[in-house]
C-alpha cells in the first residue's frame, strides 16, 4: 500500500511539473508604437529637431514577464529611452514606454527607418525556454532645408560684341549650397534689367535653374547684350582717356530656389552688385597701357562691320578697271 501511494505521488508531481513546463514554454510579447511616421528638422536652432514616440508593450501570457526594450535609429537618429530599458509586465497587462527621438544638425534630407524591439528575458521569474521577441518599424523623415550663400568678384564685367552677339563675354555669381539636399537655384535679375534698359541693353542667363549638390557650389552665369534692332545709348557713359566709353552701374540680384515651401536658413536672398560694361566691334581688342579695353564704337552710330568695308573696296577696284578699259 505504501508503495502504491508513493508511485501515485510521483506520478502527480511529474504531471504537475510537466504541465508547468508546458506553460512556461510559451513566452510572448507584443509591441506597437505611435506615431508610425515622424518628421524632424535638422537646421541649426530648430525647435522641431526632437519628438516623442510612445510604445506599448503587452504581455498576453498568464505569467509575469520581464521585458527588455531597445531602439535603433539607422545611425541617423538619436534615441533616448526616457522610461528605461527593462520592465516587469504583469500577466495579461500592458505598459506605455516613452522614447525621445532627435536628429543632429545638418542631417541630409531623406526618409529613414527606426526599429524598436521588445524581448522577454524572464517568464514567471525564470528564463523562458523559447525566444520571445517582437519588433516594430516607424519611418523618420528629415525635412528639407535650404541654406545658400552667394558671392561674386566685383565688379561683374561684361563685353558686348556688336559684330557678333554670340561672342559676348559672360560673368557669374557663385552660390554655395549649405543646405541638406541638392537644391535648384536661379538668379532673379529683374533689377539689373531695369537699369540696363535705358541704355538699350539686356541681361539673361544661359541656364535658368542650376542644380547644386549638398556642400557644393556652382557658378550661375549671366550675359549682357544689346537689345535687338536698337542702337546703344551711350550718352551717359564714362569717356576714358583713350576716347572709348565704359558703363558702370550698381544694382542687385535675387537668389531664389525652385521650392518655395522649404525653410530657408541663413540664405543670401538678395545680393548687391556692381557692373562694368564695355562695347567692342570684335573680340580682337586693343588695350591701353593701364589695361582698359579700347571701345571703338561711337556713342550713337551702329557698327558697319567688315563686310561693308570689303564691299566698298571691291567697288573701287571695279571702277578702276573700267577706267583703264576706256583708256
Image (cartoon, grey):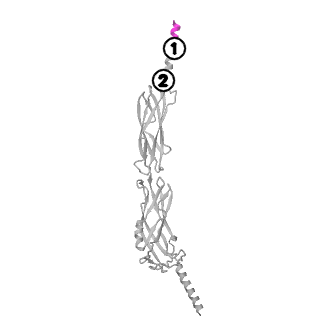
Residue 141 locus on image (x, y percent):
45, 46
Badge 2 element: helix
Q: Residue at left 43%, top 59%?
A: 256
Q: Residue at left 42%, top 73%?
A: 200
Q: Nearer the viewer, residue 40 or 223?
A: 223
Give the residue furthest to the bottom. Answer: 327
Residue 111 locus on image (x, y percent):
47, 46
Crowding at label 2, few (<14), some or many (≥20) Cα neighbours within 10 Å?
some
Q: Which mark is residue 26?
A: none
**Magenta: main secondary structure:** helix
Residue 273 locus on image (x, y percent):
44, 67
Crowding at label 1, few (<14), some or many (≥20) Cα neighbours within 10 Å?
few
Q: Residue at left 52%, top 11%?
A: 7
Query: How many numbered callouts?
Result: 2
Q: Is residue 209 above or below residue 250?
A: above
Asked whether 9 falls inside the magenta stretch, the response is: yes
Residue 280 locus on image (x, y percent):
50, 76
Query: Which residue does the numbered mark 1 point to in the structure image?
Result: 11
- Left or right placement of residue 4 versus residue 236 in this view: right
Determine the CA span between mark 1 and mark 2: 18 Å
Asked whether 148 falls inside the magenta stretch, the response is: no
Badge 1 element: helix
Q: Nearer the viewer, residue 201 or 96?
A: 201
Looking at the rendering, in which quadrant would you find the C terminus? bottom right
Residues in magenta? 1-10
Q: Which mark is residue 23?
A: 2
Q: Residue at left 43%, top 33%?
A: 57
**Mark 1 / mark 2, whichever is N-terminal:** 1
Q: Is residue 204 above or below residue 212?
A: below
Amino acid at each position: 500500500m505504501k508503495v502504491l501511494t508513493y508511485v501515485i505521488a510521483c506520478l502527480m508531481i511529474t504531471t504537475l511539473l510537466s504541465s508547468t513546463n508546458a506553460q512556461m514554454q510559451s513566452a510572448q510579447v507584443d509591441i506597437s508604437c505611435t506615431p508610425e511616421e515622424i518628421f524632424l528638422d535638422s537646421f541649426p536652432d530648430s525647435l522641431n529637431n526632437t519628438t516623442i514616440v510612445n510604445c506599448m508593450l503587452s504581455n498576453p501570457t498568464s505569467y509575469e514577464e520581464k521585458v527588455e526594450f531597445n531602439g535603433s535609429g539607422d545611425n541617423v537618429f538619436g534615441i533616448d529611452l526616457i522610461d528605461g530599458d527593462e520592465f516587469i509586465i504583469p500577466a495579461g497587462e500592458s505598459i506605455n514606454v516613452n522614447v525621445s527621438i532627435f536628429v543632429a544638425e545638418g542631417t541630409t534630407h531623406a526618409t529613414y527607418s527606426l526599429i524598436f524591439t521588445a524581448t522577454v528575458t524572464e517568464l514567471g521569474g525564470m528564463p523562458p525556454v523559447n525566444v520571445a521577441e517582437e519588433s516594430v518599424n516607424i519611418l523618420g523623415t528629415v525635412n528639407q532645408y535650404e541654406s545658400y550663400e552667394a558671392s561674386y568678384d566685383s565688379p561683374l564685367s561684361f563685353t558686348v560684341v556688336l559684330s557678333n552677339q554670340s561672342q559676348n563675354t559672360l560673368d557669374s555669381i557663385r552660390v554655395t549650397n549649405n543646405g541638406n539636399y541638392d537644391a535648384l537655384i536661379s538668379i532673379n535679375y529683374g533689377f539689373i534689367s531695369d537699369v540696363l534698359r535705358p541704355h538699350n541693353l539686356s541681361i539673361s542667363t544661359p541656364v535658368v535653374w542650376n542644380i547644386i549638390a549638398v556642400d557644393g557650389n556652382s557658378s550661375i552665369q549671366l550675359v549682357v547684350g544689346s537689345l535687338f534692332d536698337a542702337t546703344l545709348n551711350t550718352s551717359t557713359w564714362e569717356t576714358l582717356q583713350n576716347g572709348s566709353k565704359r558703363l558702370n552701374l550698381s544694382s542687385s540680384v535675387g537668389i531664389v530656389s525652385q521650392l518655395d515651401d522649404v525653410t530657408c536658413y541663413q540664405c543670401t536672398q538678395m545680393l548687391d552688385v556692381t557692373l562694368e560694361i564695355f562695347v567692342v566691334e570684335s573680340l580682337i581688342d586693343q588695350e591701353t597701357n593701364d589695361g582698359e579695353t579700347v571701345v571703338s564704337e561711337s556713342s550713337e552710330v551702329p557698327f558697319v562691320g567688315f563686310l561693308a568695308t570689303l564691299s566698298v573696296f571691291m567697288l573701287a577696284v571695279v571702277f578702276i578697271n573700267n577706267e583703264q578699259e576706256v583708256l
